[in-house]
Amino acid sequence: MGRYLVSWLLVLGVLSGCGGSSTPEPTATPVPTATPVAAAEPEAPSAQAVIAATLEVAMHDIYFGEDNNNLAEPPVWRVPAGAEVTVNLENLGGLDHNWAIVQKDAELPVPFMPDQNSDLILWAAGVLAAGEKTTDTFTAPVELGEYIVICTVAGHYPAMQGRLVVESM
């Protein structure tokens, strides 16, 4: 038994002298688990911003704007396509007038007769008597381009005309 004791002590001495392995034993690293997350509520679609424009229209006998040569130099009003347009109209002349947008690319007869050619009009403000002011609204066309604007009172076109230019937003 003495031999076994000596052998046993030698084994213990060798083991204790080595100090064990210098490589640490691997330890289990906790793996994070996915926590279920409730799906986010979809955001309500935001209301599209309403594009707006305001036009000032002065009507004289027999021209729009400041220049009495609407045939050669028609006044030009610009609006974004599809915009909500407010038109401030003022009749500074002594005759009845209105402001009407003609269908794009329409052929206008001369003279323009409102009773016979009303199908050529895209939108029109009501007729204003001399000295009247009014405000009206319309939605601008979505088709880009230039539209003729006229006074539809019999005999006022072609002298009384302008251009409405519809542009991209």
Image (spheres, rainbow, N blue to C red):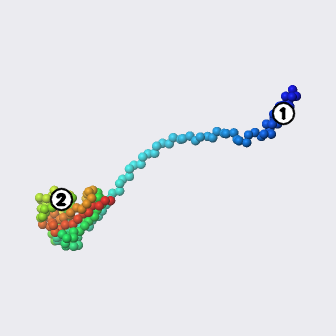
How far across and how far down the image is residue 72, in percent?
Answer: 19, 70
Which residue occupies 85% across, 28% down?
A: 4
1 vs 2, front mark = 1
Percent x, y of residue 47: 36, 53
Identified by mark 2, the residue type is Ala
- Residue at (77%, 40%) from the top-left corner? 19
Q: Is residue 131 visible?
A: no
Question: In this picture, is 166 found above or below 34?
Answer: below
The residue sitting at 20% across, 62% down in the picture is 100
- 118 vs 18, nearest the viewer: 18
Q: Tell me which label, 1 or 2, sits earlier in the chain.
A: 1
Residue under label 1, please give it.
9
Mark 1 lies on a secondary structure that is helix
> What residue appears at the point 21 percent right and 61 percent down from the top-left corner?
101
Tell me the residue that label 2 is attached to: 106
Judged from this view, the residue extending furthest toward the top is 1
Density class for disc 2 (Cα within 10 Å; few <14, some 14-19, many ≥20) is few
- Residue 124: x and y, percent? 20, 60
Q: CA distance from mark 1 to mark 2?
A: 116 Å
Q: From this viewpoint, is residue 15 visible?
A: yes
Q: Indicate the amino acid at tag 1.
A: Leu
Quarter of the image holding residue 126?
Answer: bottom left
Badge 1: residue crowd in 10 Å (few <14, some 14–19, many ≥20): few
Q: Quadrant of residue 1?
A: top right
Residue 36 at x, y percent in the picture: 51, 40
Secondary structure of the residue carrying numbered label 2: loop
Q: Give whichever of 134, 26 is nearer the camera.
A: 26
Residue 161: give its label. none
Relative height, residue 46 to residue 98 (above, below): above
For residue 78, which quarter of the picture? Answer: bottom left
- 18 horizontally vs 120: left or right: right
